Amino acid sequence: MPALPNLILIGPMGAGKSTIGRLLAAELSRDFYDSDHEIQDRCGADIPWIFDVEGEAGFRERETQMIDELSALEGVVIATGGGAVLREENRRMLRDSGTVIYLYTTVEQQLRRTAKDRNRPLLQRDDKAEVLEQMFQQRDPLYRATADIVVRTDRRGPRAVVNEIVRRVERLIDPLHCKA
Ligand SMILES: Nc1ncnc2c1ncn2[C@@H]1O[C@H](COP(=O)(O)OP(=O)(O)O)[C@@H](O)[C@H]1O
Ligand SMILES: O=C(O)C1=C[C@@H](OP(=O)(O)O)[C@@H](O)[C@H](O)C1
Ligand SMILES: [Mg+2]
């Protein structure tokens, strides 16, 4: 664990990791890194292109490499991609790097929030609801096993989610609210 632990957001596509991560970092005056954006900057190519050319396996390799780099930082906010918890080594690196926050949402909200999206290759198909439901079954236990805190994002806007994260993280660090 770094001297100043990182705050790491995990959860499914459309949970709000990228949006809330940026707001949370601004709120806490910390630097923000979005794993997918960093991968895109590094490759000079967007996520659909990487999936097209290298397949999902190639993307996952890049994702593990990026998680390795980002988890070595200190005191930053990190938004991961929804599949970051699939590999055991990723889960370990994330856990060792700070406080992990699972942004939970429902498949119904995921469908609404990603309806017009063209940047998520795994959702460019007609049976999105089934795919998201299957992913939920596989990944929800992994998100829960990795996270220190679970925060719902399906019934409130990003600002309210940020406020709850700040409250919950403070409580985790100082459970009795008795600062010295
Ligand atoms: N709590 C929220 N309430 C309503 N809309 C949200 C919320 N969080 C994110 N969104 C919207 O959902 C979409 C997907 O959010 P994004 O941050 O890209 O999710 P993720 O990075 O988890 O896939 C964006 O259009 C964003 O504005
Ligand atoms: O769930 C996934 O496997 C993925 C989620 C995406 O990130 P978001 O969760 O930010 O959409 C992105 O990493 C890639 O398209 C794969
Ligand atoms: Mg994102």
Image: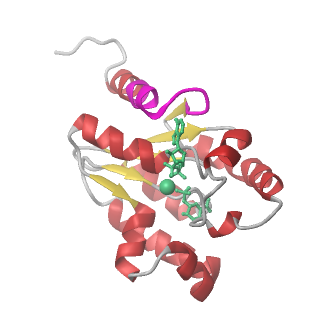
Depth check, front residue: 136 or 87: 136
Residue 99 in view: no
Residue 133 in view: yes
Identify the colour scheme used.
Answer: secondary structure
Give the x, y percent position of residue 156: 54, 27
- Residue 66 covered by magenta stretch: no
The answer to whether residue 6 is left or right of residue 125 is left
- Rendered residue at 56%/66% (across/down): 119
**Residue at the bottom extreme, as displayed:** 53
Ligand 2's quadrant is bottom right
Give the x, y percent position of residue 25: 29, 42
Quick check: 154 above or below 110? Answer: above
**Quadrant occupied by the C terminus:** top left
- Rendered residue at 30%/12% (across/down): 177
Quick check: 169 above or below 21? Answer: above
Quick check: 40 above or below 138? Answer: below
**Range of the magenta residues?**
152-165
Give the x, y percent position of residue 160: 44, 25
**Residue at the left extreme, as displayed:** 180
Give the x, y percent position of residue 74: 24, 52
The answer to whether residue 158 is left or right of residue 59 is left
- Rendered residue at 70%/48% (across/down): 111
Quick check: 26 above or below 88? Answer: above
The number of discs equals 0
